[in-house]
Image (tube, grey):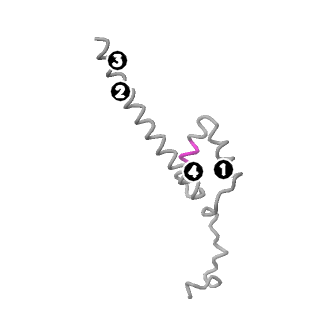
Amino acid sequence: MDYYNPQERNYHQYRDYRSEPMTIGDWIMTMLVMAIPFVGFTMLFVWAFSDETNFNKKNWAKAQLIWGGVSIVIVIIVVAIAAGISSISFR
């Protein structure tokens, strides 16, 4: 079997749709789903960890979840500092 011969390996038969670029319509539908409360957040997990999701959307969903986690940590730190400062100033 010659690994460099596309006809022999039948590359076109096993076309992986997950690696194709997403169209503008795909991104519009993704943004529309993300705008729905609770559904968008749930879909981030589905897209990030599903094996059937387009690789572009999968990586984007993972990045969104990471940014969300970083944002939550920053908010907790800021609130803790503000609570500490306010408890010191009102003594």
Instruction: Say which amino acid is labelled 1.
Output: Trp
Q: Residue furthest top?
A: 91
For the residues labelled 1 and 3, the Cα–Cα distance comes to: 44 Å
Helix, strand or loop under label 1: helix
Instruction: Say which amino acid is labelled 3.
Output: Ser
Q: Does residue 89 appear left or right of residue 31 in this picture?
A: left
Q: Does residue 7 appear left or right of residue 78 in this picture?
A: right
- 63 up-or-down from 8: above or below: above
Q: Position of residue 77 (x, y in %)?
A: 37, 31
The residue where tag 2 is placed is 80
**N-term mark: 2 or 4:** 4
- Who is closer to the viewer here, 12 or 84? 84
Looking at the image, is mark 1 or mark 3 nearer the viewer? 3
The residue where tag 1 is placed is 27
Residue under the point 67% across and 42% down: 32
Instruction: Say which amino acid is labelled 2.
Output: Ala
Helix, strand or loop under label 3: helix
Q: Main secondary structure of the magenta part?
A: helix
Q: Does residue 7 appear left or right of residue 77 in this picture?
A: right
Q: Position of residue 79 (x, y in %)?
A: 39, 26
Q: Quadrant of the N terminus?
A: bottom right
**N-term mark: 2 or 1:** 1
Instruction: Say which amino acid is labelled 4.
Output: Trp
Looking at the image, is mark 3 or mark 2 nearer the viewer? 3
Q: Position of residue 51 (x, y in %)?
A: 55, 58
**What residue span does the magenta drawing correspond to?**
42-47
For the residues labelled 2 and 4, the Cα–Cα distance comes to: 33 Å
Which disc, if any, is residue 86?
3
